[in-house]
Each structure stands twice: as C-alpha cells, then as structure tokens.
Amino acid sequence: MNPLAQQLNETLSRDNPRVAEMLSGLGKAIYMPKLGILSQSAEAKQKAKLYNATIGIATENGKPMHLDVIQETLSAYDPKDIYEYAPPGGKPELRNIWRDKMLAENPSIVGKNISKPVVTNALTHGLSIVADLFADVGDAVVIPDKNWENYELTFHVRRGAEMVTYPLYDADNRFNSAGLRDALLAQKDRGKAIVLLNFPINPTGYTPGLQEANDIVAAIRDAAEAGINVVVVTDDAYFGLFFEDSLQESLFGQLCGLHDRVLAIKVDGATKEEYVWGFRVGFITYGGLSEASLSALEQKTVGNIRSTISSGPHPSQTFILRALSSDQFQAQKEQKFQIMKGRANKVKQLLDSGKYSSEDWTYYPFNSGYFMCLKLLTADAEAVRQRLLNEYAVGTIALGETDLRVAFSCIEEENLEDLFDRIYKAVLDVKNGRA
C-alpha cells in the first residue's frame, strides 16, 4: 500500500477507528498524490513568475488559449475562470460559499465538525464516490422499497454490495422508521451497513416530519449501539423544495457526531436546487469526526476524483459561483420555488377533489420535491404507461405493477388537470380492456 494511503488510514484509525473499519478495500488504498503533476503545478503557479511549463494547457497572450466562436458566447467571464482545469476538489471559492449556504440553511449543522464540501460531477458522482470508498462485495446497502433505480447500479452492479429494502411507508402512511430499524439490526452479523436517506424522496416526493426524523435518527443510533458500523448518506438532491409541514433541513446535522459507529455523509448539489441539471455540479461533505479524520476522508475523496474524472468542469463551477454570489439569487430562487409549490398543491387539489374514482387509484403521500406517485388499483402500471404514450401523447414512469410516477415539476400548472384527466382515461381504458 502506498505510504500516503497508509498515513491517511492511520489517522482515521487513531482518531475514529470505527470509521476506519468502514472503508472498502479501495477506500483504504486510495490517496491523493502529494508529489505528482498537480502538486508540482500548484507550486509552480505560486513561484514560476517567468515561465510556467508544468500543466497541460495552452496559453496565448497571458491567458488560456481559446476559440472566439466559443468565447463570444461566454464574454461575461474571464478565460481563466472557464478554460483552465478546475482543481480536483473544485474551485476553492465555490467550496467555501457552498459551505456557508449549507450552514445557513441547516441550523442543526452549526457547531458540528464538518469537512469542506468537495465538488463532484453532480450527485450521481458523489454517490459513486461513497460506493467506491465504503462499499465492498457483500456489504448491505439499506434503502426503502421505493427508491431511485440508479442506487442499484452504483452500489450493487459497480461495487457488488447487496441491496436490502424495507417498506417506505408504515400503516399510517408515515416514514417507516421501524422498518428501517429492523433492516439495520438484521445486519448484525455483517457488522456494517450503508444507509441511503433521500429526502425529498424520488419517486414519491415525500419528506418526513420532525417526529419521523427523530425516529429515523433513533433507529440509526440503535443499530450503532448494537455494534453495527453505519455509513449514513443523506442524498439531498431535491433539498429546499419543501412545500408543506415537513422537516425543513437535511438530517445530516442530526447525524453528525451521533455515535462513534456512525459516519454522516451529505451528498447534494446545484443540479436540482438551482435548476441547472446539465451543469453537473454537486458536493460531498463529511461530518462528525475529528479535523484530522475529516481531512483524511477529504484527501481520499479528491484522490478518487483524480483517479476517475481528474476534475469536474470548470465553466459550470464558475457559473454557479457567480449565481450564489449575486444579490438577486435568493429572490429569483424564491420565485421558482413558488411556481413548484403551486404545481404540487394543484396536483393534490385535483387528486382530492373527487373527480377521479378512489376505486381506480390512490396516491402515496407527497409534500416536496419534483414527483408524486399514483398507486393504480384496477390497471397495470406498464399497460397504462404504454396507453398514455400511444393514445394520449403523455409520458410517465411505471414502477412495478401498481406505481406510476408523475413529474409535476415539468408541467405548467394550468396543464395539470388535463394531464391527470388523460392519465385517468388511460387507466379506465386498460381497466375496461380497451388498450
């Protein structure tokens, strides 16, 4: 093993030994080179005032070389802020401002030890880093039965972990913290579990309330006290889109420092929060450990980025930094939030109006995010999806035999009634054998 990796592992073993045990084989082996091309280039950038012949970019007239056909569409930006490589960990100014934003929006994090956010190529990349660093063949990844399908690709297909599910909702249509607890305690023989908490949830658009959140934290604490090392990842992709009375911040804050057998990891990003899906800017943050351990995990994370994508895209990081620094940012974001909230409320109003028979469908509780899910009672979801496409020019997502996911986020509020009218017609068509 490389001495740098060994040094990082020793730091973790000394300060937070249970976290050291959580690392995968790759997680133990990864490190960020200190004497490689990047470190030598960084040193040259500070001291080579005459000629800097270190890093592989081309320059012209003292600026990164570029084509006018590209720069003319980006004239508001200095070439050095879009054409040069971004550092593997991301633009320092962006990491700082995102940390400030995180603390402002999540009071429960204030006063906790957290790492500086590392920039990822959006949230999927952040989750992939978690999988690389902490998931080995046979490890348990605990998720609700209604979940984002990419979790299986990321943790099971790529890393060989075993997906363990529990029912998302309990008998009272609240988050099933008892099911989470049972799924975790069932990993006693393994001695380790990775938990993914995605709020608001994709696909159902649900965020737990305060008591539910407390119950979730208690379930994780119970598992830790039972001797299970728990890696808890808050997948906060849709953070901030809370439309009703629910938890208004990430569970990351409550999980930081919860127990020496609990490692809290926050994966979030501008992707959905700031409506910049194609920019691919996300973040990964660790919490609740000693400063030295947080630094060690940060270095392993940056080493993982260096070994896979080298670094994230510079232009989009610059765009996000500029937006977050603008005095117009909050007002513009609030305007978009109100549009999204209006769409969610309109959907719930329609579904509760009595216009559609409760014999044919019901819906899973939703209060946040981009989506909601219908539970079809008299028709197969895939057959309905096909009927909607072929007869009504409507696209939806079928999940299993009964569930149909509808993204109200991309439908204008005035069109939502027509959308659900068409969905209901398709359900009746399938129910009555007309499809």
Image (cartoon, rainbow, N blue to C red):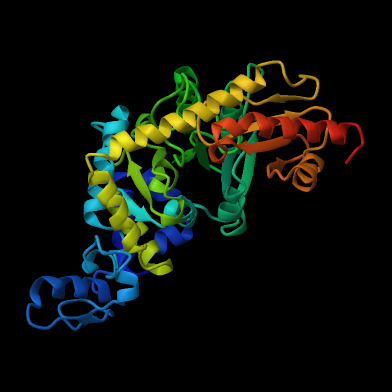
Q: In which quarter of the image is the N terminus?
A: bottom left
Compared with residue 47, is residue 175 higher up or lower down, i.e. above or below? Answer: above
Q: Residue at x 47, y 25 (%)?
A: 243
Which residue is more in the foreground, 368 or 45? 368
Quarter of the figure with residue 434: top right
Which residue is more in the foreground, 169 or 229? 169
Residue 126 visible in image? no
Residue 407, horizontal then vertical, whole percent: 59, 38
Q: Residue at x 46, y 22 (%)?
A: 246
Residue 388 visible in image? yes
38 left or right of 259 in image: left
Quarter of the figure with residue 67: bottom left
Identity of the residue furthest to the front in this view: 414
Residue 163, horizontal then vertical, whole percent: 63, 45
416 left or right of 280 in image: right
Q: Residue at x 66, y 37 (%)?
A: 405
185 left or right of 374 in image: left
Q: In which quarter of the image is the C terminus?
A: top right
Residue 262, horizontal then vertical, whole percent: 41, 37
Residue 317, horizontal then vertical, whole percent: 31, 56
What is the total number of numbered labels drawn onto the structure image? Answer: 0
Compared with residue 387, is residue 377 higher up or lower down, i.e. above or below? Answer: above
Quarter of the figure with residue 391: top right
Q: Which residue is drawn at 68% across and 42% down?
A: 396
207 left or right of 167 in image: left
